Image (cartoon, rainbow, N blue to C red):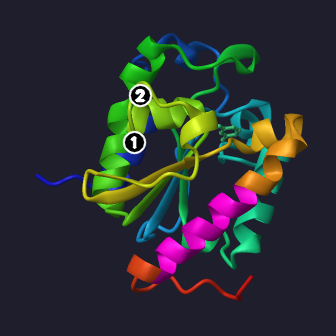
Amino acid sequence: MGDSWELLERECRSCRECALCQTRKNVVFGVGNPHAEILMVGEGPGANEDEQGIPFVGRAGMLLDDMLAIIGLDRTMVYIANIVKCRPPGNRDPLNVEQDACIGYLRRQMALIQPEILVCLGRIAAMRLINDKFRITREHGVWYDGGGMRMMAMYHPSALLRDPSKRPETFDDMKSLQREIRRICTHTEPKRPW
Ligand code: URA
């Protein structure tokens, strides 16, 4: 039998494959358009996301919404998920063993969505989904092909909150994303030009 969103979400919400299930309040499954041509993947839920069960709802999420708005996108036009679906305590990086336990759910989401474009938000997602030696300072904004998608990484919004000097480079990466959307996406028309 084929996979479905219902089955996937049910399995994910009852998952006990790693220790993060013991400290989570909510599984943060993902949000957005299940038919999106653009998939954005962060690292893992923080405290606000764990409380609400929705990715990118804290300060980093507000900045992500602003970044999307710059190129005429909003959350209804993309799908947003994370490498791990449960909060790593104290906001530490997700361990490899936790990523390994969780990545299958994201792969199944990808198979259901079949996005044209994958945007990795930060180093952790890029190392897992583009290549394991990925260097975010050198390779952000660079386009790669893989898994039938165009893929690129940009700085994580939390990194931009910590270090605003990275924002101009991220603005350029967003413009590059907009050009790629216009080039290859058939049903995502950014709302207004920048
Ligand atoms: N940071 C992430 O990587 N993901 C979230 O959902 C929130 C903050």
Residue 43 visible: no
Most prominent secondary structure in the magenta stretch? helix
Q: Relative to 98, is 145 on the left or the right?
A: left
* Ligand 1 visible in quadrant: top right
Q: Relative to 190, is 5 on the left or the right?
A: left
Q: Quadrant of the C terminus?
A: bottom right
Q: Relative to 70, is 141 on the left or the right?
A: left
Circles 1 and 2: CB atoms closer than 8 Å: yes
Instruction: Answer few, some or many: residues within 10 Å of disc 1's Cα (few below 14, many 20 plus, some between 14 and 19).
Output: many
Q: Mark 1: is the Cβ under 8 angstroms from ligand 1?
A: no
Reading the image, the residue beneath label 1 is: 106
Q: Is residue 178 above or below residue 11?
A: below
Label 1 to label 2: alpha-carbon separation: 7 Å
Looking at the picture, tell me which residue is in the foreground, 2 or 37.
37
Residue 6 visible: yes
Q: Give the magenta-colored segment's residue range.
A: 170-182
Residue 103 percent coordinates (x, y): 38, 32
Residue 116 percent coordinates (x, y): 37, 66
Residue 8 percent coordinates (x, y): 35, 46
Instruction: Answer few, some or many: residues within 10 Å of disc 2's Cα (few below 14, many 20 plus, some between 14 and 19).
Output: many
Instruction: Look at label 2 and name its amino acid.
Output: Cys
Looking at the picture, tell me which residue is in the foreground, 6 or 76.
76
Q: Splitting the image into 4 quarters, where does residue 58 fall?
A: top right
Q: Splitting the image into 4 quarters, where does residue 171 fall?
A: bottom right
Instruction: Look at label 1 and name its amino acid.
Output: Leu
Looking at the picture, tell me which residue is in the foreground, 150 or 112.
150
Q: Exactly how many numbered labels are in the figure?
A: 2
Q: Is residue 137 magenta?
A: no
Reading the image, the residue beneath label 2 is: 102
- State the SS at label 2: helix
